[in-house]
Amino acid sequence: MNKKRMRLKGLIKKESLQIIRDPSSIGIAFLLPVVLLLIFGYGVSLDAEHVPIGIVIEKPGHLAMDFTGGFYNSEYFSPTVFSNIQEAEKALMKRRIMAICWIRSDFERRVLSTKDSPVGIIVNGVDANQAKIVTGYITGVWIKWLSQYARSKGLRLDAPVNVEQRIWFNAAVRSRNFLVPGLIAVIMTLIGGMLTSMVVAREWERGTMEALLVTPVRIKEVILGKIIPYFVLGMGGMAISVVIAIFIFHVPFRGSFLALTYASALFMLTAIFLGLLISTAAGSQFVAGQIAIVITFLPAFMLSGFVFDINSMPFPIQVITHIVAARYFVSILQSLFLVGNVWKIYIINCIWLMVMALLFFRIIRKKSHKRLA
Amino acid sequence: MLRRILALTIKEFIVILKNKKSRMVLIIPPIAQIIVFGYAATFDLKDVGVAIYNEDRGEVSRDVIARFQGARVFKIVNWIQSDREIAPILNEQKALMVLHFHEDFSKDILRGKGGNLQIILDGRNSNTALIALSYCRQIISDFNRAYSKRFRGVLPPARLKVRAWFNRTLNSHWFIIPGIVALLTIVVTLEVTALSVAKEREAGTFDQLLVTPMTPFEILLGKSLPGLIIGILEGTFIILMTCFWFEIPLRGSLLVLYSGLFVFLLSAIGIGLMISSISLTQQQGLMGAFMFLVPAVVLSGFATPIANMPEFVQRFTLLNPMRYFLVIVRSVFLQGAGFDILWTQYIPLAIIGVVSLAVAAALFRKRMY
């Protein structure tokens, strides 16, 4: 027992020294999350503001001015006037404007007589998601105008059904509130994978693994000795990220910190195991590096639910997302930050993380044994 | 000179392809990724869970609900009876939204007043919430129009006639999948180039290369060509998948697209070699590649638009080659754009490429001492 502990202690010390002497790992663990989270936190947003919109009024008139005034008063738009539709269309082609509001010469006459006067809206559909959001904003301008118009004419034009929306957990509909917690998961996946994916491969390549293997040290101890220092480093980076999310990006945190710590520890272990697994399986740093790029960052970015909603994916892809550890952590983080302790979501995702961690650990042990033989 | 460059290129190819694992890394992931990501990356909603809380016994609410049942985006998953049930359903993500019809909903509408339909949404993913909400508004406004026409004979003074250019159904796959061409091409190119010099430096063979008659320029070419060839092959493969598997229309010319791909690869290779020649070890090379790749992808406009970023971040993205190539791919695919519109994208890409390649070549010698 005592000897075991001594061996483990020795290994941890050796790994820790290696980390300290190569400042790049400390940089990865502490500096990188800060830099990445700051850049991405500011840079990643789905909220369109000051959308450039072109306005074409074929026949200036009181009503047409009134209608387009809504665009000038909205913070969502920054309007530009075009004298004819051809010019506006050209600007749309060149991506100078995102949408066109086209008011034809008969607008006023039709509003006053037949009603139901059409207003042409052309959106650039290349970015379909933004186009939808912008269309939503334009609809908002239109609805507001309708009610103002009715009031000014003393008309009763109440629409049969009024929508009264209440958005829970994120009343201001700030995309940053869900993107920043998701980013923490993506960044920690990277860091866990990056920190560890090369460490075993490095030992094999330098031949020090063989030296280690002839000592009485067990393979389990080698693995533990590698995990513990990196785990401590990773958790440090995690803590910094959470602080940045709360104090710099003002993402509300409504859950318990204990729950967060526990889930983070589980996730960190999974990420580190994955890194070790890569580095054990790859054998050389070159291949380990290539695999790490391919299987850590992109899946965490695309398949974790961080930007793309998992529920909207086709079923087979939803099944595949279950092998991406970040998926569980993103779900836990989004709930802990924005909703609170939703135990049902929390526990299910933690169980998945635990299963993955155990699975990775077993594979690492098995793979490492093989190398011994 | 040509023979020397060719020899180095062949040697680089052997290094990349001789190891079975490293061969696999170049071939399998792009195939798997284009398919998986192609299907996964969408902002469009489907089967959005809706819970209905109907306190109204009238006919109008039933008509409205029928419209939601008929909409492909929504799926009614729950009928609830009390206020208390709302919170658990949303908290545990059993439904994304609750439609709440008040007791007097139908009565108010029949009396000519407006009936309030309360929609409570889970805003955890604000984008999903906004899109779902705009679908709801669409359904309600269609309903209102039909209802007013039938029972009231009055229509609102104006209506919007929305048309989307280039992507009529606003299918977000059309936006994302051409973007994957840029994404996977840059990943593969960096993988090939970022470790190539660092690996030799670590093994000490780079010094040997420097004492051969090869000039730094020749070394540069020899080290770049494999990345260029592999990048073009992978890019072609992904473009083919985009056209024929995902059936995204390619409206522009291949010449415009491939010129874009070529300058984009130049800049990616330049940056990859630059990282590689700064690094002393493979680990540093890998980290450098990561450090470049991750921000380059996240801040490229691939998933979240550059226009939404704050000014200083937008300026920072001017250095990002992916930003320009994304515009090129998407415009060529969906818009059929030509050089006249896109030249503003080619020039910065070419500048990034030339500068980074020159720096890489200069660093070859510098780092020796």
Image (tube, coloured by chain):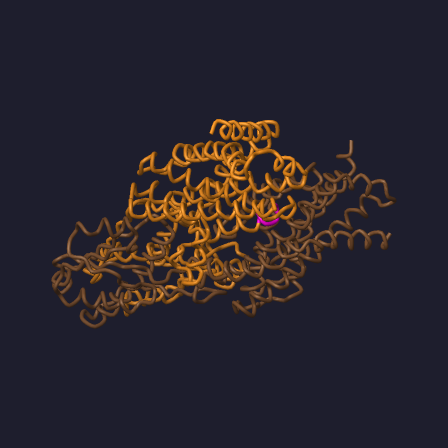
Q: Is residue B324 magenta?
A: no
**Residue B30 showing in the rendered view:** yes
Residue A303 versus residue A366: which sits nearer the camera?
A366
Q: Where B348 sits versus A313, above or below? A: above
**Chain coloured brown in this rendering:** B
Residue A277 versus residue A366: which sits nearer the camera?
A366
Q: Main secondary structure of the magenta part?
A: helix
| Image coordinates for residue B368, horizontal then vertical, percent | 78, 34
Residue B213, quarter of picture = top right
- Label tally: 0
| Image coordinates for residue B261, horizontal then vertical, percent | 65, 57
Find the magenta span and give its range. A288-293
| Image coordinates for residue A313, horizontal then vertical, percent | 42, 60
Residue B250 versus residue B237: which sits nearer the camera?
B237
B202 with respect to A273 (left or right): right
Q: Where B366 sits versus A345, above or below? A: above
Residue B31, quarter of picture = bottom right
What residue lies at 22% left-to-right and 68% top-to-bottom?
B148
Residue A293 versus residue A75: which sits nearer the camera?
A293
B199 with respect to A343 (left or right): right
What residue lies at 50% left-to-right and 30% top-to-bottom?
A4
Q: Which quarter of the rendered picture does the C terminus of chain B lie within?
A: top right
**Residue A78 showing in the rendered view:** no
**Chain coloured orange in this rendering:** A
